[in-house]
Amino acid sequence: MPIQARTEFAAAINQIASEKGVDVEVVLDAIRQAALAAYRKDLSFRNESIPDDFEELVAKLDPSTGEISIWRGEVNITPPGFARIAAQTAKQVITQKLHEAEKGAIISEYEQKVGTVISGAIQRQEGNTYFVDLGRAEGLLPPPEQSRDEFYTQNQRLKFYIKEIRETSRGPEVIVSRTDPGLVKGLFAMEVPEIQSGIVEIKEIAREAGGRCKVAVISNQDGVDPVGSMVGQKGVRVQAVINELGEEKIDIILYSDEVKKFIASSLSPAKDVEVSLDEENKVATVKVPDAQLSLAIGKGGQNVRLAAKLTGWKIDIVGRGDSAVTEEPKATGEKIEEKTEKLEIGNGKMETEVSEPETEGVAEEAEFDKLEKEKIVKEEAKKNQES
């Protein structure tokens, strides 16, 4: 609470508290502690011993005038000129106390933001760790929280997921992430109003940062298409999230309480799948057409791996063995299509259908010779008619 007295000291205290984002009482307490430290130092300068009851001494501060005094019980033991001595020697103590109080206030503020997405800029790099400017605080982006396909540059602005407040050798630090599934959830919440209003809910997310992500959604209101809400008109909503994630592929699927249906959907883009469950071992056996095997498994097994993370079931994929074998047409004696050849005779035109079998190898060469001979005969007939 600000000091109400209209003095320069009170105004200065209020300004410091406002700038540091701490309570006025925190600033006053820092000054009191600094006054006791200054009194101890003053005793040393005067070659006086530190009293045994030093811990019981109390520093008092008039919040309106700024007058500082040292008391032993009800007795004022402030040495002459102590205010000037305290001002010279207590600056470092006050600064340190205020810095600790400010950092504590910032950490408390960001503790409430854990689990949210915030914008920040890459500030500097130390080894493989990046430091991120989050505004009032500095965040740490350690190697495990960095996306494998991203390269970070100084002053680059990105969205970060505030993962936790972690105790480090430097004290409490704000740990941010670019790989946590919560980043995807937070980005969609920014782009999709239906998520903010609770109409559409993200039930599960499985992600391999920089590669692919699967998002299972459900609607809490009849008539609302959850997948369509996530994608947006012409894909603008999902594309905005993809752009922020560096072109990471995103599959949006419909969540279902029916395990078979949910597993079948999770293997998208594979279609026509049949699911059988071993509920005791929580294993799902999925049969897919041979033509869909590569889609169901994905590159390096990524698609089925993400589906297993999303559903919480171990998934075994097997083919149905229904590959169709197509025979190639034979090279001889097969008529493929009819072509029409136009011949000009005199000033008129006459269309003649010529059966032209399209063959391969020797058959094509023989047909070419036949057409050449017919062409020569027709040219000679044309000359005879003109003469």
Image: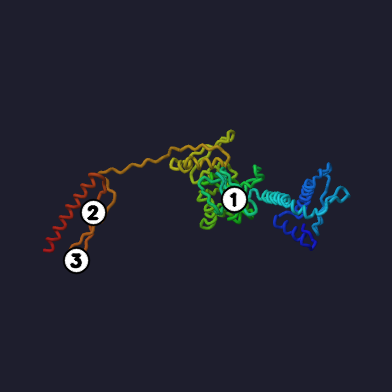
Q: Is residue 141 visible?
A: yes
* Mark 1 Cα-neighbour bin, 10 Å: few <14, some 14–19, many ≥20: many
What's the amino acid at mark 2?
A: Val
Left/right of residue 24 with respect to residue 293 in the rendered view? right
Give amino acid for label 3: Asn
Mark 1: amino acid: Val
Q: CA distance from mark 3 to mark 1?
A: 84 Å
Task: Decide which of tag 2 and tag 1 comes sooner along the chain.
Answer: 1
In 3D space, how far apart are the residues under numbered discs 3 and 2 (Cα atoms)?
22 Å
Q: Residues within 10 Å of mark 2 (few under 14, many from 20)?
A: few
Q: Is residue 241 left or right of residue 7?
A: left
- The residue under label 1 is 132
- Residue to which mark 2 is pinned: 354
Q: Residue at x 79, y 55 (%)?
A: 83
Q: Quadrant of the N terminus?
A: bottom right
Residue at mark 2 to residue at mark 1: CA–CA distance? 76 Å
Q: Which mark is residue 154?
A: none
**86 or 150: which is nearer to us?**
86
Labels 2 & 1 near each other (Cβ < 8 A):
no
Task: Looking at the image, tell me whether mark 3 or mark 1 is earlier in sequence order.
Answer: 1
Residue 336 % position (x, y)? 29, 49
Q: Relative to 87, is 129 above or below?
A: above
Residue behind mark 3: 347
In the image, residue 122 lies at what x, y percent? 57, 51
- Work out whether residue 143 or residue 147 is closer to the camera in this orientation and state it: 143
Residues 54 and 273: in front is 54
